[in-house]
Image (spheres, rainbow, N blue to C red):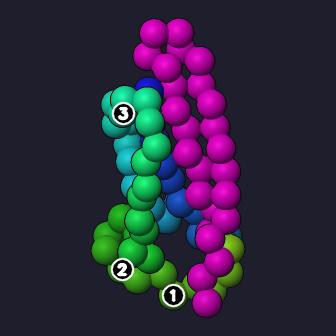
Amino acid sequence: ADVTITIQDPNGNHFRTLRDHELQEPGDYAIQWDGTDDAGLLAVLEGDYAVEVEATDPNTGLTVTRAGVITVY
């Protein structure tokens, strides 16, 4: 699938792109976020950061999106 993983800060602003339309084979994956934004600056705003994973099948065009939350203190 074509995979994109993004993080938004507690105010709903784009904070970080962890994967940007990367082609990945089926399977289980783990990804680690170091708490920094796209510029490498550490998150200083406390609260819930929204994580969105979007995967698109390149053959069918079917897209599946999953969301979660990471709380930063």
Judge depth for marks 1 and 3 and give the one in front.
3
| Secondary structure of the residue carrying numbered label 3 | loop
Query: Magenta segment, which residues?
Result: 49-73
Which amino acid, mark 3?
Gln
What is the CA distance from the residue labelled 1 to the residue labelled 3?
32 Å
Location of residue 25 in the rendering, given as x and y in whole percent from the top left corner:
37, 29
Q: Amino acid at mark 1?
A: Val
Q: Label 3 near label 1: C-beta < 8 Å?
A: no
Where is mark 1, residue-wise?
Answer: 44
Q: Residue furthest top?
A: 60
In the image, what residue occupies the spot 36% across and 65% down?
38
Instruction: Farthest residue to the front: give it.
Output: 27
CB within 8 Å, label 1 to label 2 = yes
Residue at which label 3 appears: 24
Dot 2, crowdedness within 10 Å: few (<14), some or many (≥20)?
Answer: few
Q: Image quadrant of residue 18? A: bottom left
